[in-house]
Amino acid sequence: MLLHWLFVNALIILSCSGIECLNVKIINGSLNEIFTQDLTLDKDIEYLIQFDSIETKTPLRVLAYSEDAHVSSPILIVVKQKKEVVSWQLPMVVDGNDGSTEFKDTAKTLCYDMTMDNRTLSEAISGISHYNSEFMLEDSPIISISTSSVKNVSVNVTVMPESTFYILPDEVYNTTVTSSTPRVYFYDFPDNATTTDNTKTVILEVNSPDNICMTISIQNASCPVYDLNHNIRFEGYFETITTKGGITITKSHFPNGFFLVFVPKPDDYDCTMVLSTSNTERRKEITFKITPSIARTDYINAIILTLFCMFVFYFVFGICFFLCSSRAYVPRSMEYMSERCIEENPSTSRTANDNASVNEDYGSNEDASSAREVIFNKPEVFLCDLARKDFRILKKKSYFYLWHVLTVAVFYGLPVVQLVITYQKVLNDTGNQDLCYYNFLCAHPLGFFSDFNHILSNVGYLLLGLLYICIIYRRQLWHKDLQFDQEYGIPQHYGLFYALGVALMMEGVLSGSYHICPNHSNFQFDTSFMYVMAVLCMVKIYQNRHPDINATAYSTFGVLAVAIILGMWGIMAGDLYFWIFFTIFHILTGIYLTAQIYFMGCCKLDQWLFWKIIRHVFYDFWFSPRENIKPKYKGRFFLLLIGNLCNWMLAIFGILHHDTDFALHLLAIFMMNTLLYFIFYIVMKLCHKERINLLAVLFLLISLACAGAAMYCFLNKSISWAESPAESRRYNQDCLFMRFYDYHDVWHFLSAVGMFFIFMVVLLLDDDLSHTHRTRIHVF
């Protein structure tokens, strides 16, 4: 008590200024007592509420309320403790994005520095659990109340023990908070969670029935506690939530435990990015719990099982595929030697091809260009009509795709990795959990990374891409004669296959990079090489029947560059005008590609294309409507019509729902058209009585099964980068497998397997034609 007396007298002395000195009235307070006092500047009185030694199991909470206080002359409340001084005013003014909000009632939990206490927390918790010991506050608070108001104002002050302060694992807690009455809780890690065990973590899960925006803060267990909207981001981790949220916390970052702070915001702008009217009755109900996460052994088991499954896949698939593939290649039969193509197209002769210069411009095809009308007017077009170039030219042209993919991978991938690592470093340094859109209920940190499991699950793309490259190399050695034979089978362009394998590996690299810190501005990293794989698949399938007029690597990657630009534009500024422009561009591009496929490359895009169309319409259809109204290639016409209808439906959906996710819309266009062209190719094969390799059929069924399961996992999304961070957390969900992987991780594994097998189907699709002369292989 001597210390209290000295402190109060010193406060009285310091309160005097010049000739004026406020009268200080000392009141002995007790817990849970409502102190009511009328205040006015005329009385020149400052009220000090002091307490004797307080015996309580939890820290104290100070409640203050005044209906009369005005912001122009507020009531000032100062709480003095041994280790800190806390002050605030009534009414409390909280600044929001749409103005300021005044609160007539306030509540503060007085900080108790857990790191400076002489007793251990286990003793305190023991007191809570068994009620056999008391928690004594030797530094009892002194509360000072004053005002500058010239009118009488009434204030109510109550000091009470915090009803719930210490949080135990696996228990559910409920509370209600406002911007002026935040809540603070304390959690300490178990003793067996040593500081060297970085994988010893806990997961905080928060749920709320309302959409009021709120900030959660995880702070070190030391004073002061930052529990106001303007300072809650000063310490530790913080994030915004609406109805659901979570955060993973490790003892390595909070060795002495942590304070858990809930502070609602005066408006919802930070959660919805939409201005809303402030409401002083914004009371948010919260349900939360803290559960232990996984230990180091769980990490090790998940990593070992993942790599073991990939090893088993390598072993089983390698044996099955290499045994089923004929190692002793059967020589082609030379019995059938048709003169049809040789007579009609002398340039296809072996001599002419052997004399061709390999230094010719690989992006042009003069022979095919000069014979466009001949090909167009033929009732049936065969592969020999569109496979005239020397194999060395086509081989070098094919490998251009590989060099382009490798170049893009280096110059695109390295800045991506650098950027996302910088994002992760900023998150670690600032504690701002809104930077990255994690599934916080299943995000397991490891070392530098906050979400290691979503990075690890991309290993399937890397390993299966490498396996595909090995298969292509082995197949190239087995069937080496296919590369030089210009009379039988489909021309073998292995450069495109290698490019597909590299693209699959780069999808793993970029997807893993994206998941280091997934957010609104870097989602295109996750999809860029999906565009590449989709386009390369279409180019490879088209090359099978159109080797001489296939798109060059330059034009192909030019199209991909346009797609990346459109994706960036749509993400950054995807308004209605952009969607209108993109829809027109989408439809026109579809019409042009349809014409290219239907006329087998005879439709050349130049300045005369428009006049050619006008001439064809007015002359051919005008003078011979009955002959020209019927499609020349009926099967091709109806399949392409179905494809165009699908694209038009997707375009209409996009323009009607232009506020949707443009990046996924663009990806859907690429994937849908790849699938449609793949189906078109298979149907045309069957229509021309070609058979499909049994192994290819098996791989196709496996890829379809993986695609269906992967799509189910993809639709069960755990984040949504297109929304705000708080809205994205509504999709957070618990782990699905081994307490380590969620639905999106399973999507990574299944999509990697599905793409690998679809690439295998592309590789084996025309193996039935390896002994068929090119004069009998139809072009479609």
Image (cartoon, grey):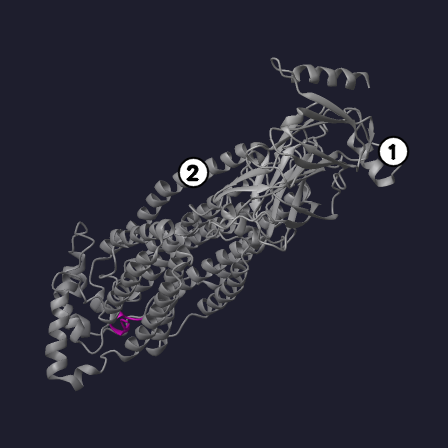
Q: Quadrant of residue 632?
A: bottom left
Quadrant in the picture for the N terminus: top right
Residue extending furthest toward the top: 18
Distance from the alpha carbon under mark 1 to that under mark 2: 54 Å
Q: Quadrant of residue 149?
A: top right
Give me the disc on residue 744.
none
Relative to 169, residue 590 above or below: below
Q: Residues within 10 Å of mark 2 (few under 14, many from 20)?
A: some
Q: For the residue marked with disc 1, what is the amino acid?
A: Ser
- Residue 418 in view in this figure: yes
Residue type at mark 2: give it: Leu
At a point 41% along the width and 41% down the height, the residue shown is 416
In the image, residue 537 sits, relative to residue 249, either above or below, namely below
Which secondary structure is most common in the magenta stretch? Answer: loop
Could you tell me residue 585's position as x and y percent? 27, 61
Location of mark 2 (residue):
419
Of residues 136 and 81, which is closer to you in this image? 81
Q: Nearer the viewer, mark 1 or mark 2?
A: 1
The secondary structure type at the circle numbered 1 is loop
Which residue, given by chain and number where applicable, does mark 1 sit on? 133
The extreme bottom residue here reads: 626
**Residues rendered magenta in the picture:** 772-780
Of callouts 1 and 2, the N-terminal one: 1
Secondary element under disc 2, as helix, strand or loop, is helix
